Amino acid sequence: MSSLKIPAGTLFRDDGRADDPLAQFNGDKWQLRLETILDAEIAPLDECIRVPVRITSDSSVKSVSLGDNRRFVYAGSSQILDALPPSEELMTVKGKVLDTVP
């Protein structure tokens, strides 16, 4: 297995509360968007890494913590003009909030 490279400018979108099966129906979604600020690399057999991200949202909520149990899915590249075709590896990446900055 090779490492998974995640370039700066990779977008992930909020997919609702991971522990709420009704979130899709009751509208309990924040629609946060995360954009990686730096290149990141996940080594083989590692589950996750820390990487700085920029958080944006259509709502007043602009932060997320581990206790919120949010789920994020790959949403493309912020560099639309130079966008590379999506990698099969990137399509299967899952994000998890590890820590927050005060």
Image (spheres, helix red, strand yellow):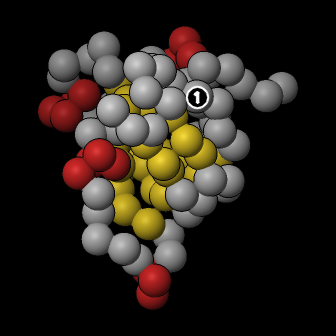
Quadrant for the C terminus in the image: top right
Above or below for 46 versus 16: above
Above or below for 80 versus 60: below
Report whether 80 appears left or right of 26: right
Outermost residue toward the right? 102
Report whether 6 appears left or right of 36: left
Outermost residue toward the front? 1
Question: Looking at the picture, how far across and down is residue 73, in whole percent?
Answer: 34, 42
| Residue underneath mark 1 | 49
Report whether 70 appears left or right of 66: left
Q: Secondary structure at mark 1?
A: loop
Question: Looking at the picture, how far across and down is residue 70, in whole percent?
Answer: 43, 26
Question: Looking at the picture, how far across and down is residue 36, in whole percent?
Answer: 59, 52
As rendered, which of 88 and 27 lies closer to the eye?
88
Residue 66 seen anywhere in this rendered image of the structure: yes
Q: Residues within 10 Å of mark 1 (few under 14, many from 20)?
A: few
Residue at figure coordinates x 37%, y 62% from the top left: 76
Residue at figure coordinates x 44%, y 66% from the top left: 77
Q: Amino acid at mark 1?
A: Ile
Residue at figure coordinates x 35%, y 24% from the top left: 17
As rendered, which of 1 and 20 lies closer to the eye?
1
As rendered, which of 33 and 31 lies closer to the eye?
33
